[in-house]
Image (tube, coloured by chain):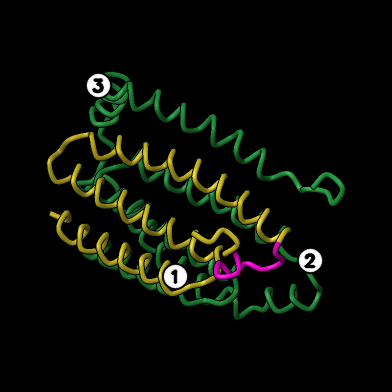
Amino acid sequence: MLSTPALVLAMMLFSLGLVGLLSRRNILYMLLSLEIMLNAASLAFIAGGARWGQVDGEIMFLFILTLAAAEVSVALGIVLQLSYRFHTLDVDAFSEMKG
Amino acid sequence: METLFYIAAAVTVLATLRVITHVHAVHALLYLVVALIALALIFYLLGAQFAAALEIIIYGGAIMVLFIFVVMLLGPLAVEQERTWLTPGTWVGPGILALVLLGEVGYLIAVGDHLPVTVSEARQKGVSIALYGPYIIGVELASMLLLPGLIGAYHLGRRVSKESR
């Protein structure tokens, strides 16, 4: 079966997304890395569902898809506001709220 | 089928690597679209056809279009920058990766029913029944998530004028 290599692939994609999230300082790329990590999680769910022959994996994929759509719309609004106010996308510049 | 899976997995990992290492946002988005389509092929090979279709339509279509809109809104698009974005070299990498995927899909269509992967009607029916049966609370919660998402995106997306600040 393909489930084990699919899980390995999900792990690799999640690690790549995590590396991107930690290494990039551009907020747009950090959002892209978040998308990659969400995709890796949904791949793991689908692989699990395929391994056990259950439909729950696909249902969790639908919920992850909904979550990603809501998250991206709000996060991109925040990116637009930040770029209007600070004229940069560097996350280290958005440190007014010390705490 | 295993070979198809490994080729698609290689395409996914390569495209994802280019996403997190690229400096141009539009190029990174091109590679991310290729990675998402390769992932949709993997979903298909795992037997989740509905998830594969949703991955292409919603992720590769809607969410990536949102990202591209925002990239276009972010900076004033100078002609020089536009020229550097549209060089033919930009399209070579994603084009080759997408061609590999196209070959795989062509192979899947040509082989057709001989593969163990066929659209199983019972499985899709099971997804629907479970979604509106035991998972109905999840559907309600998703709607409760999407409405604040809509309002929040509308509120944040306004361009704040100087005088009203």
Residue wearing tag 3: B134
Q: Kindly identify the amino acid type of the residue bearing the numbered disc 3.
A: Pro
Q: Is residue B26 visible in this depiction of the protein?
A: no
Residue wearing tag 2: B76
Chain colored green: B
**Residue appearing at x 38%, y 26% in the figure:** B139
Provide the chain ID for the residue under circle 2. Answer: B
Specify start and end residues of the magenta stretch as a single range: A86-94
Q: Is residue A96 visible in this depiction of the protein?
A: yes
Please tell me whether residue A25 is drawn above or below residue B51 in the rendered image: below
Quadrant of the rendered image containing residue A36 = bottom left
Q: Kindly identify the amino acid type of the residue bearing the numbered disc 2.
A: Pro
Residue wearing tag 1: B97
**Residue appearing at x 60%, y 62% in the figure:** A96
Name the foreground residue: A96 vs B59: A96
The residues tagged by marks 3 and 2 sit, at their Cα atoms, a distance apart of 49 Å
